[in-house]
Amino acid sequence: MKVKTKLLKAHNVAIAKLLAILGFTSCLCAGCAKYGVPEAEYIVNGQVVSKETLEPIENIRVSTYDGYMFTDNEGNYQVSYLGGDKGATVCVEFRDTADQYRDLDALIEFRDGEKIKTFNVGMTPNDNDN
């Protein structure tokens, strides 16, 4: 009887460890499909320019919940976000890593059927006279 109980306990521990390992490793994939939940890819693109000169700004970090990219030499960017298929609100952050322009955050709203939006940005230069 004791041997049978020890064997069952060892079996339960082994199964619990296996489930814990499989459960945690399945969460590591951020882009995995969410079964039973329809999703869509939303794309925000545009150009980042200086508000003062209207010149394009290169190397502005543009990020969403799903990742980031840097503007090219003409200030162009394109970021995407995976969300529900009935519309979404995407927070897009604009950061100048050279600290010459003020940070900017924007909420972009996608309604039913919209998947791509153009959002052009004018960034304000920092006041470095402080």
Image (tube, helix red, strand yellow):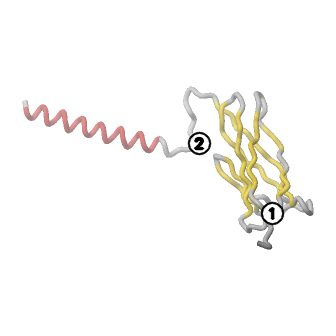
For mark 1, give the secondary structure: loop
At 63% across and 28% down in the image, what residue appears?
38
Instruction: Spot the residue most to the right.
Output: 53
Instruction: Spot the residue most to the bottom.
Output: 129
Vertical comparison of 38 with 57: above or below: above
Circle 2 packing at 10 Å, graded few (<14), some (14-19), many (20+), is few
Q: Tell which circle, 1 or 2, labels the residue nearer the N-terminal end.
A: 2
* Residue assigned mark 2: 31
Vertical comparison of 99 with 33: above or below: below
Which one is in front, 60 or 13? Answer: 60
At 56% across and 33% down in the image, what residue appears?
34
At 85% across and 55% down in the image, what residue appears?
122
For mark 2, give the secondary structure: loop
> Distance from label 1 to label 2 (Cα)?
28 Å
Quadrant in which the N terminus is drawn: top left
Circle 1 packing at 10 Å, graded few (<14), some (14-19), many (20+), is some
Quadrant in which the C terminus is drawn: bottom right
- Residue 26 pos. (x, y %): 47, 41
* Residue assigned mark 1: 58
At 80% across and 68% down in the image, what residue appears?
127
- Residue 86 pos. (x, y %): 70, 28
Mark in front: 1 vs 2: 1
Vertical comparison of 124 with 30: above or below: below
Which one is in front, 73 or 97? Answer: 97
Q: Is residue 2 left or right of residue 115?
A: left
- Residue 111 pos. (x, y %): 77, 30
